[in-house]
Amino acid sequence: MTAVERRRGAAYLAEQLDAFGVTHVFMVPAVLRRTLAEIERRTSIVAVHTHGEKSAAYMADGYARATRRPAVCMAQQVGALNLAAGLRDARLASSPVVAFTGGNPPLDGRHGLYQAADDLPAFDAYTKFNRAITDPADIPETLHTAFRAATSGNPGPVHVQFEGQEGEIDGREAEFPAAAPLVLPAPPPADPTALDAIAHRLAAAERPVILSGGGVLKAGAGATVRRLSAKTGIPIATSLSGRGVIAETDPLALGVIGTYSRESANQVVHEADVVLVLGSSTGSMVTNFWRMPTPRADVLQIDIASEMIGRNFPTMAGAVGDLDTAVSELAARAPSCRRDRPDWQARIETLRAGWLDKRRAFTDPDTTPIRPERLCAELTTALPADGVMVVDTGHAGMWMASMFEITAPTQAYIRSSGHLGWAFSAALGAKCALPERPVVAFTGDLGFWYHLAEIETAVRHGINTVTVVNNNHSGNQSRRGFVLAYDGDETDRSRQLWVHREVDFAAIADNIGALGIRVEDPGQIAPALRRGLDAGRPTVIDVVTDIDAVAPLAWDPEGWVQKY
């Protein structure tokens, strides 16, 4: 075709999404119908029809986090606010999700169009870029700008509203260029003087720690950070989002720190004299409500986004730039031989051994009802070396942060940034992105209820995830709060606020067409996981666990979290 050709927007949209490398769109019909038809005619892109707009957003989010590439979700105008709500987790996780919705058609001064509302402002809080298209000629520039915004710098969701409640503007003609790949600006190089200052302070540290955040994985800098750690002997702690940069069985791995964390990891970081923060927003979850690093520690920081430097902690030295390049340059500046710190290494080993002994008391026993700690330990053993673990928030996130271990940096760990029910749908998106890799979702029954209907989506599209449900027929994370609200006097009415009916999710899965496996004995967990991973079909493993088992609170020397 010529460089510019007059045709429908739908044809251009289909070809341009294909040129961007999009392989799936997650959507609730009806929106951009002509584009979907052209997608079928011109590309191999798969349209995944979900049962809810939030599920569509969560699936796109899971896809984007699994690949670190932009993923597309769509909804007609009446579902736009549901889609916006689904983008909130992507915004908190800096995930490059691209949302398309319909918008008001021209009404010539008339009012009262069925299902119409001005939804565009609602996306401002959750997106890096938010624009309406009312002229088809604007589609190319808007599309390239949106995808570029989603993926450059600190990534995040974007929104494009297409005129017409179902985005009917895609049926109009305009002069469109040929589809072209996405061109991203080169990330800025880090200031050599700042890297010199960071290297100098690290060399003098007695009790240093590296804090590796989600930005390290987004930058593909995991191997570089491991090389820096090995060269300097500095151990690595991770945020939940940064999990997977190093095997947590590695002697230089401390585990997850923060509110959902490993006890010994928090203890080590509290005692550190220097903390090198890499690609972390230093939010409340990773810092245990900004209680670590402590004021005794010097904070050094490298990030792609300048606004992150010194965001929540005074920074002794900070550098802005691509993390992979900056950490590589830092490693070149580090001492040429590993510096031994025997007292610090011994202290870390003592804290680690104490925590592992404490954890073993919960993960080893064959008690019934099943303890969630045992379930998490079994997941550690069962997850293949190339496995992807997708985890919900709440108790699911707390159990997995402390009782599950990443055993190889080839594994991936993707977690909800705060929205219960996210994991199941996100795992379906991750599996669409990585069809050859095992994808396991871990959630509780309360989280699973949110988007239970997507079992049918998984069956219809052959999205073969394994979903493990920690089923204690309750939302017992809320129990502490309700006991406090009732001044310590539990009542039948108060229990109704967090206890649910006992339901066999395996039977529901079977009825929908998935494989359902019910587990009531700890000895059945490992065989069930093997069966699910080998099944070649969507699988739900419903594990009946102890309603009285409560996830451990974060270790904190001043007791703030325990108190509140």
Image (cartoon, helix red, strand yellow):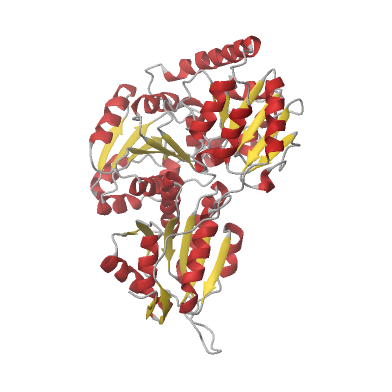
User: Which quadrant does the N terminus fall into?
Assistant: bottom left
Does residue 114 appear left or right of residue 428 in this picture? right
> Does residue 259 appear anywhere in the picture?
no
From what the image shows, is residue 34 above or below residue 228? below
The answer to which quarter of the image holds residue 317 is: top right
Q: How many marks?
A: 0
Q: Nearer the viewer, residue 260 or 348?
A: 348
Residue 30's x, y, as percent?
A: 37, 70
From what the image shows, is residue 294 above or below residue 111? above
User: Which quadrant does the C terminus fall into?
Assistant: top right
> Does residue 160 appear anywhere in the picture?
yes
From what the image shows, is residue 317 above or below residue 10? above
Does residue 265 appear left or right of residue 35 in this picture? right
Q: Residue at x 32, y 24 (%)?
A: 521
Residue 224's x, y, as percent?
A: 52, 32
Does residue 271 appear left or right of residue 110 in this picture? right
Q: Nearer the viewer, residue 179 or 363?
A: 179
The answer to which quarter of the image holds residue 345 is: top right
Q: Nearer the viewer, residue 375 or 387?
A: 387
From what the image shows, is residue 71 above or below residue 397? below
Q: Residue at x 49, y 18 (%)?
A: 359
Q: Nearer the viewer, residue 453 or 520?
A: 453
Residue 72's x, y, as percent?
A: 42, 59
Residue 5's x, y, as percent?
A: 38, 79
